[in-house]
Image (tube, rainbow, N blue to C red):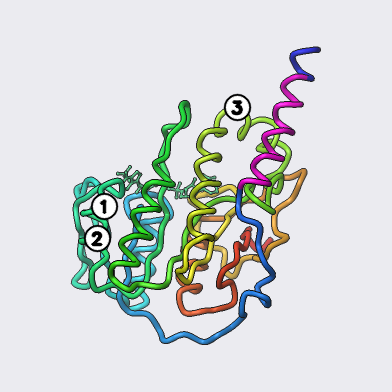
Amino acid sequence: MTWLLLFLAYAVALTLALSRAGHRSQSPTAAGADTARTPMQRLLVIGATGGTGRQLLRQALERGMTVTALVRDPVRLDMSHARLTVIKGDVLDPVAVETAMAGQQGVLCALGHKRFWYPTRILSTGTANILAAMTKHGVRRLVCETSLGIGDSAGRMGLYYTLFVIPLILPFYFWDKTRQERLIAGSDSDWTLVRPAALTNGDARGPCRHGTRIGHYLLTRRIPRADVAAFMLDQLDSGTYLHSAPGITAAA
Ligand SMILES: NC(=O)c1ccc[n+]([C@@H]2O[C@H](COP(=O)([O-])OP(=O)(O)OC[C@H]3O[C@@H](n4cnc5c(N)ncnc54)[C@H](OP(=O)(O)O)[C@@H]3O)[C@@H](O)[C@H]2O)c1
């Protein structure tokens, strides 16, 4: 019983810490809502061999965009297209990121990893490299996938994540996500942090629910990666969530 109470206290303290350490959204209106943008054509995708990243590539190409993917192992991508350039490199290597950034108009980041069990800075260091390369090449627009459960969305992954998954499996990972969010929010880029609910590989379900009060404190909401990718691509040319961190869940 004592151990259970101690664990609950730890889970609650971690949730509060993630709430304080992550980005806290301004209202989208205050951030300057819907300033129309010139349609973007040249795009860099980070995390392109991952679940969301593959959807980003596929959908960006379907939208007629010219896409560059920075990947550690091109063989894993098993995708080719006349408008797709694949650059082999690690996001932790600033030179590789700079090379991939040259000539881009915007960046979509769906970086993630499975090194959950010890402290890492893969998300934050990789993101610092992305931001530095953006500054160097004059690229302004960044849309980055983080997660519900951070900043002013703390607790909104549902009780199962708040009391079990995040405290037991993902504390280091989520802590690095708070660093990632704060780096981006502190940059002078045109950024949007996209915070999805639990991801699935299901088919796209169409327009999703989004906003800064999305998610549920008790229930875990879900969303297909395909819908997250569509939402991220939509943000490139939209100012609705400029300098904001919308949560997104499936429509119903
Ligand atoms: N799973 C969920 O329910 C959930 C919920 C909310 C938010 N999220 C977040 O959403 C994001 C995307 O998740 P996902 O499951 O779609 O992605 P994922 O399948 O985990 O893919 C992550 C991508 O990041 C790449 N990557 C990792 N380290 C790299 C490095 N050093 N250099 C270059 N690329 C690197 C991976 O490349 P390799 O193929 O080379 O490893 C892969 O392409 C993650 O940040 C995740 O935490 C997940």
Which amino acid type is shown beneath numbered disc 2?
Answer: Glu
Q: Where residue 225 sits: x, y (%)?
A: 49, 56
Q: Where residue 221 sits: x, y (%)?
A: 67, 50
Which amino acid type is shown beneath numbered disc 3?
Answer: Leu
Rendered position, 81 above or below 17: below
Q: Is residue 9 magenta?
A: yes
Of labels 1 and 3, the one closer to you:
1
Rendered position, 81 above or below 52: below
In this picture, which residue range is highlighted in magenta? 6-21
Residue shown at the point (55%, 60%) measured from the top left: 194
Q: Where residue 105 sits: x, y (%)?
A: 33, 75
- What is the magenta segment's predominant secondary structure? helix
CA distance separating discs 1 and 3: 32 Å
Q: Which residue is mark 1?
A: 94
**Image marks 1 and 2: residues in contact by CB distance under 8 Å:** yes
| Relative to 161, 96 lies left or right | left
Residue shown at the point (35%, 58%) measured from the top left: 130
Residue toward you, 131 or 66: 131
CA distance separating discs 3 and 2: 36 Å
Q: Quadrant of residue 251?
A: bottom right
Q: Which residue is mark 2?
A: 98
- In the structure shown, which secondary structural element does the residue marked by tag 3 occupy? helix
Q: Which residue is mark 3?
A: 168
Q: Which quadrant of the rendered structure holds the N terminus?
A: top right
Q: Is mark 2 within 8 Å of ligand 1?
A: no
